[in-house]
Image (cartoon, rainbow, N blue to C red):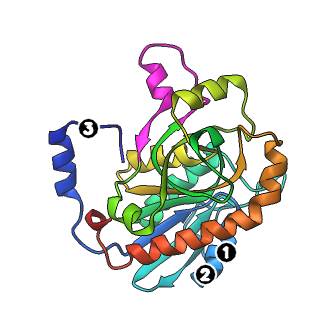
Amino acid sequence: MAPPQDGKEAEVKEESVPQRPISNVVFIIAMKTEASPLVEKFQLTEESNSVFPKGVPWVRYSGKYKDLNINIVSPGKDIVLGVDSVGTVSASLLTYASIQALQPDLIINAGTVGGFKAKGACIGDVYLASDIAFHDRRIPVPVFDLYGVGTRQACSTPNLVMELNLKIGKLSTGDSLDMCPHDETAIIANDATVKDMEGAAVAYVADLLKTPAIFLKAVTDIVDGDRPTSEEFLENLVAVTAALDQAATRVVDFINGKNLSEL
């Protein structure tokens, strides 16, 4: 998962992909509401002996599902305010610590997103992101502007997409739930179908540490619709999380027994 490469570099990268079945999958999920159905589905247990630094609110559930070791990690509740620790800062820290401690073969960043009806998104749609970028890191200086956008590509999964008939779209990430005019301009420039508050941060760290990652996102609200985002998000969160749960289970079932190059 990285910026586009020339043919020779891509060939070298493909040859370096381990030809062994995936055995260790780590889900990175921002909100407890999003994580709980999968914890139940895979019959995972919350780990009391944390592999994370002392004092952080991060939560880890682990267990065995078929031939896979599954971990679901979440940034937990903000220590001061008691709300889910959403956003890019928590996501990047958690991703870094999880890769260091758990050494995953594959990261799955699963969660809910806002979708754009102009790009064909509907509430309840589940997307596999092809490209991930930031829309709120505006640095109008040559080259720094590209760094700010920080485009990354998800791990290539053509067989997974074909078998499960998943929708594909570009994901844009920012630290605000709403969308100001500056963000809208950047999101359009990113050619994004969906927007979230964590994906590009996870993508940056995963790329930095050479860990394959995919991004599974379910639409809770229509950003360019006629209803307030926060209202639509809260209204649809539970139902859309159920759709995300079903899609994530199908993805894991497909992954079981396969190596990365077979995805």
Q: Which quarter of the image is occupied by the C terminus?
A: bottom left
Where, by quadrant of the figure, is residue 125 drawn?
A: bottom right
For the residue marked with disc 3, what is the amino acid? Gln
Say few, some or many: other residues with alpha carbon within 10 Å of mark 3 (under 14 / 14 to 19 / 20 or more): few
CA gap, disc 1 to disc 2? 6 Å
What residue is disc 1 on? 37
Total marks placed: 3
- Residue 61 at x, y = what percent? 60, 75
Three-letter code for the amino acid on which mark 2 is drawn: Lys
Is residue 91 or residue 55 the one in the foreground? 91
Q: Which residue is mark 3?
A: 5
Query: Is label 1 in a helix, a strand or a loop?
Result: helix
Query: Which residue appears at 16% of the width and 48% of the height?
Result: 11
Looking at the picture, tell me which residue is in the foreground, 38 or 202: 38
Q: Secondary structure at mark 3?
A: loop
Q: Amino acid at mark 1?
A: Pro
**Label 2 secondary element:** helix
Q: Is 136 part of what is drawn in magenta?
A: yes
Label 2, label 3: how far apart the Cα atoms are? 38 Å
Picture quarter containing residue 174? Answer: top right
Camera-side residue of 46 and 221: 221
Which is nearer the N-term, disc 2 or disc 3?
3
In the rendered image, residue 117, in percent from the top left (x then y), is placed at 65, 42
CB atoms of marks 2 and 3 within 8 Å: no
Residue at x 72%, y 33% (from the top left corner): 179
- Percent x, y of residue 142: 43, 14
Does residue 48 appear anywhere in the picture?
no
Q: Position of residue 95 (x, y in %)?
A: 52, 54
Stretch in magenta:
134-153
Dot 1 and dot 2 residues touching (CB under 8 Å): yes
Q: Is residue 175 visible?
A: yes
Q: Which mark is residue 41?
A: 2
